[in-house]
Amino acid sequence: MPTTRDRIVAAAVEMTTSSGWAAVTMARLADAAGVSRQTVYNEVGSKPALAETMILEELARFLQVVEHAFDAEPEDLTRGIERSVTDVLTYARDNDLLHAVVSATHGADTELLPLLTTNAAGLLGVAKEVVSARVVPYAPDIDPDRLDPAIDMVVRVVLSHVMQPSGTPARTGADIAWLAGQVLGGSRADAS
């Protein structure tokens, strides 16, 4: 059974995806979740704290996609990267909250966008941690001092494609995996 906090965050996501972040108020959240305004503040804090919670919870779902993709390719790092990139981009393409945040670049409804772009240090750090933990067991053929910058590059390129896709998830996944394979010493010589 969802907690009060879960219901409040779910209501905030629903309002954001249907009406935009500017339409989210603590009073409307309280009504939607069936609680008092004070309970909303007690559970999620301020509106900026709520925004961060929404984004971090969505990031956790994206990172689960990454985890499952690497689990599906335990023997081949390049294939693991390709599958994780393809799956993440597919998930992003169909993600209503991400679309609400990215499409809110007009008017005054841009409060959420910096959490994904200019203020994304926490987001990047968490994503890099998860990817690094998944890459290291493959024992990539790269100088250990170069591994962190290589992972940083891959994560940033993928996030760029999440925000502004330039091709199909499969094609982009293959291209990024090929590039990562060249840098990390992956086992596949060409993209499929």
Image: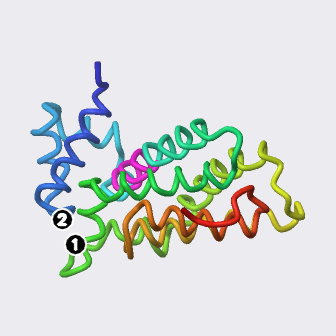
Residue at the far bottom: name it.
107
* SS of the residue under disc 2: helix
Residue found 67% across the figure and 38% down from its top: 74
Query: Horizontal and vertical percent for residue 130?
Result: 63, 47
From the viewer's side, name the closer residue of 74 and 33. Answer: 74
The residue where tag 1 is placed is 109
* SS of the residue under disc 1: loop
Main secondary-structure element of the magenta-colored stretch: helix
- Which picture quadrant has residue 114? bottom left
Of the numbered discs 1 and 2, the one sitting upstream in the chain is 2
Q: Residue 22 carries which label?
A: 2
Q: Give the range drawn in magenta.
A: 50-59
Q: What residue type is labelled 1?
A: Asp
Whole-angstrom CA distance, mark 1 to mark 2, is: 6 Å
Q: Do the residues labelled 1 and 2 touch (CB within 8 Å)?
A: yes
Query: Horizontal and vertical percent for residue 8?
Result: 25, 38
Query: How many tags in the picture?
Result: 2
Query: Horizontal and vertical percent for residue 32?
Result: 12, 39
Query: Horizontal and vertical percent for residue 5?
Result: 32, 33
Residue found 34% across the figure and 37% down from its top: 43
- Which picture quadrant has residue 100? bottom left
